[in-house]
Image: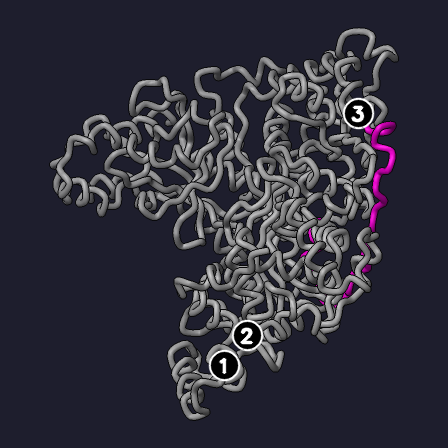
Amino acid sequence: MGKINASHSSYCYDSMLKRSDDKYLRSCSRIEPIDDPNEDDYDDDDDDDDGENEHEQQSQRTRPAVWRQEKLDEELGHRASGTSDDERETRTIRYDLPEILERIDENRLMYRAEGNANIVLSLSDNKHVLRMRKSTVECQEGKADSNVDLRRFVKYSQVIASQFSPCYVPAPKLAHLNTYNLQAFNERLRCFRPAMRLGKEIRELDGILYPDVAFLPKWLYPARVRDLSQDSKISSTPTTTHYQTYCVEIKPKQGWLAYEFCDNIPLPPEPLSNGGGDLRKCRYCLHQYLKLQKKSIAKISKYCPLDLYSGKPVRVLQAVKGLIGAPQNNFKILKNGKVVYDDKREKSMFNRILREMFPRDGRTKDERSTIFMNLIKEILLKDFTTNDEHCDRKLLSIKKDRKKKDKNQLHERACNPVNQQFLPQSCALRQILDVQLLVKSSISTIDPSKLNKSRSDPYSYIDEIYEKYLTYQEDALYDGRGSSRTTWPNGSFCAEYLSEEEQYQLGATALDCSIMITFRRLSGAEESSLTDAARNHIVSIEGMKFIVNVTITDLDPKSHKHYAKYVEQLASSASVGNDPSPFSRCCAFGRCTHYGQTMGNKVVTFTDQQLEDYQDCTFFTRKEILRVHQRFHEASPDLVPVIMTEGQASTIQVPRERIERLPELVENPFKGRMCEAFSRDGDGNLTFEDFLDLLSVFSEQAPRDIKVYYAFKIYDYDRDGFIGQSDLLNVITALTRNELSLEEHQQIAEKVIEEADVDGDGKLSYLEFEHVITRAPDFISTFHIRI
């Protein structure tokens, strides 16, 4: 079956290059079966009648299975209750397999990310992603080096989805890439791909289509904005809010100690197993040794999966903090579908993202970071069957590690075991751990030889599991216990229907899965128009409300070779960790930097830690920060000390009149509004940190969306969240310096509102303002102050 599917992809690629453009376009518009039984005898000139007869014969052969699936769907559909139509459309697991491929034109695709086996491409509609299998570049052109039947993957997705709550796992579809030249398509992707991944490329035209979980599903949006695209583009029905959609990807990894209850895994060599080392470590922490030796990582992460799975709030916070500090391939942040923070970006980018996420709220960098980590913690532990929108969570904080030099050795740290009772039953972490534990419970009794019984077809076991799954569903319908056995959790399915080897394969899928946490801040107006089902997805923290969603992805089946690789990797990691000498010189949890004391007559304005913090929170270099302080000191030498402590930088205020007299601001018609927009109390008096923020936003390095946000805030004179006619009159007066008459001012303001006011309410919302201002060619150059 897999060979037929791979041949189909190869045939499409080889033959398309030989066809004329017109004939190729006609073939793309035709809907073809996924797996044509007469594919080897396929004739490009077959008429439509033959195709219809063949399709009818195929339908006759599959009718009993289809009837069985329809019967199951009908029965399960009657049992779905308590959800809206929109939610049911998103959450319901589909049990019937599609008979046709959904065709995707190459011009609709953009590179998103990739792993070892797949490339992820996002569609231009911001609603779906296409996962394409990769093959080595050296293989024969147009031929894949693995025979993989993607229909099996779709079958398997139904089986693995039954182990989770329906809201966590999206339903995939089969898709086909329409491209005239696959090699040219690969070349177009190369410039976006990591250099380490270029050894493989797309050689098969078939892929799997998933909902794009970097965005919230439509049913979670307020009623008035459900028809809007989620990338903040303007439409005929604009929203008054301007909050962005963020998505955090976390790979939680294995949730128990490496050698816990795994009797048939060979222990590492002496002396680690006899007291010379510590086996009380999880698989992830042990594997850090091996990665460091191979130089695939620069430093060992603080993250421990057992902290994440513990369910204890402080330990979960510690895990999230460890992921942020050393993302490796286990932590990413996306903004409106684009990766903005991962292991390839500096830590300063994370702090900039937090400033965009919580704009100008008077909080420090550490406070924003604490709010973000608490938000992720609450979402990970949330039960989406309950409504706790009015429960404003108390912030928890964790102390900084002040003794990095003494306590950051991985050899001195033991991973603390997990107690499942602290994890809520319905949260995503608990359900992932429950599936992972299938590996732990079966690995001691598994027969490795049974996993290798079909070496030529590494995924043949999926067919057997799927048949058992259908049998399980039928039994659940007709034995009188169906109502309790067709909903999560389906532990009885694994225990009663699957062999130990099949349970292992199912559990291994969850070892490398990903949790996608998508969230967006809500305004008061939006909250009132949410459905009851959507209100279960609200998380409140520090007076802010977020609409959130959690999806579990990367639930791909593992081949029969997984067990051997699992054992080999575990033994290699423990063996490398047996010798602490290579790692005793490494700061296991980060970079230890020792700063020397300033000597001689040189005056130190800030400590190195202060400069590092300011650099993380702004778009300035250290030299530019010192230059900003010099300007601030010149504005008021009697108030601003040459050497500033952290407390003085946030408390000593310079009157706005002195700030406005600085050379950089004296000629600016909006200098007063700028001071008011950046002052903490709104009166225009600025502390050094306020002044630093002001010049940072007006620097060349500041991104466009931040500049737009503050431009809107500056032009909103009456601070009502809109730019009305009175605001525009003030802006026009400031720009023209009273050179025009009041009547001319009025005409200009009316003209601006007429052209930019999409919803006709007589004022400009943020989205309407953004739509206009970002198309002004000189906006970036004029919204700039050089120091």
Which is nearer the eye, 623 or 524? Answer: 623
Which is nearer the eye, 523 or 55? Answer: 523
Residue bearing mark 3: 410
228 relative to 180 in the view: left or right: right
Label 3 environment density (alpha carbons within 10 Å; few <14, some 14–19, many ≥20): many
**Is label 1 in contact with label 2 (beta carbons under 8 Å)?**
yes
Q: Secondary structure at mark 2?
A: loop
- Residue 486 seen in this snapshot: no
Report the magenta residues as a range: 379-408
Label 1 environment density (alpha carbons within 10 Å; few <14, some 14–19, many ≥20): few
Q: Position of residue 80 (x, y in %)?
A: 57, 59
Mark 1 vs 2, N-terminal side: 2
The image shows residue 613, relative to residue 569, as above or below, that is: below
Residue bearing mark 1: 737
Residue bearing mark 2: 669
457 relative to 447 in the view: left or right: left
Cα separation between marks 3 and 2: 57 Å
**Is label 3 in contact with label 2 (beta carbons under 8 Å)?**
no
Q: Secondary structure at mark 3?
A: helix
Magenta stretch holds residue 558: no
135 relative to 569 in the view: left or right: left
Cα separation between marks 3 and 1: 65 Å
Q: Position of residue 729 (x, y in %)?
A: 50, 85
Which residue is at 39% across, 52% downward? 124
- Total marks shown come to 3
Q: Quadrant of residue 635?
A: bottom right
In front: mark 3 or mark 2? 2
